[in-house]
Amino acid sequence: MLLLETLGLKMSLLESIPSHLQLPVAVTCYWIHCAEPKVKLHQLKALLLMIVSGELHRITEDPDSTVLCAEDDSIAYNEFLKWKEKKLQSNNFDLEAAHSFCQWQCCLQMGLYLNQLLCTPLSEPDLSRLYTGTLVHRLYQELKSTPSVENLFSLSPRMTQLYQVLLNTVESTLSPDFFQKTSKTRSRSCKKKTSNKKNTAIRCAVPETQHLCTVNRFASLGVDD
């Protein structure tokens, strides 16, 4: 109760989640409520698809897995590997997405520490299969340009169902217009920043404000026209 209250969840919300993924999902719910700037829908989907890929790898490659690997799981995993080998259309690095995913990792780290401190009331996930930075960034980039990537594991009914359960669980903690609000807030924020930059540029161009430069200890290195 202490762990879940800290993360702002009730156990009933996690009952449909596999036990070893309950802590990551609880952390994800906490992250999406507290992240600044707000999490984008594509970022959430990329994160959940990455978690599903780790599950698919676990049941197809781990001989000691308690879950039997079905033929469609193997086919889906092979298709996933083929997708990974394809060249990424865009190599642009998204700093805001990187910041958001780093926040998620910090939340997960603190969640793991608290879980351990409380004698692991929730099962600990396999971190080696839970998060891959390059993969989550690629999924995010491709989701922005090719939304069909969300169906990456459609050949495996089990993985498709897992993805939907994860997504529905997280979205059930959000208001229906959460992601619409995100885009509007972001737009207003960008306009405000642009306006501030313009005002700053105008102020800097006014000679009367030049005395403010004296607080800069490197001002003497400047070259006057």
Image (spheres, rainbow, N blue to C red):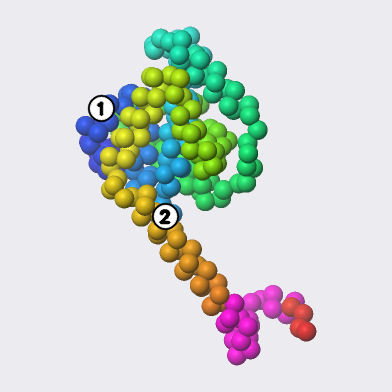
Distance, label 2 to label 1, CA atoms, is 31 Å
Callout 2 secondary element: helix
Up-down: is 17 above or below 29?
Answer: above
Q: Which residue lies at the image location 51% right of the left edge and 47% below the top edge?
A: 97
**Eye-nearest disc, 2 or 1:** 2
Question: What residue is pinned by disc 2?
Answer: 183
Disc on res. 160: none
Residue 225 visible, this orientation: yes
* Residue at image coords 31%, 27%: 17
Residue labelled with disc 1: 15
Q: Position of residue 178 (x, y in %)?
A: 33, 50
Question: What kind of element bears circle 1?
Answer: loop
**Residue 56 x/y as whole percent:** 46, 20
Whether 196 is among the magenta residues is no
The amino acid beneath tag 2 is Ser
Instruction: Please rate how many residues cluster around mark 1, counting C-alpha atoms within 10 Å: few if below 14, some from 14 to 19, many from 20.
Output: few
Q: Is residue 204 magenta?
A: yes
What residue occupies the far bottom of the structure in this picture? 208
Q: Residue 11 is drawn in which quadrant?
A: top left
Characterize the magenta stretch by its predominant secondary structure: helix
Magenta-colored span? 201-221
> Of marks 2 and 1, which one's residue comes earlier in the chain?
1
Relative height, residue 58 to residue 12 (above, below): above
Amino acid marked by disc 1: Glu
Question: Front-most of 141 and 2?
Answer: 141
Residue 37, position in %: x, y? 43, 54
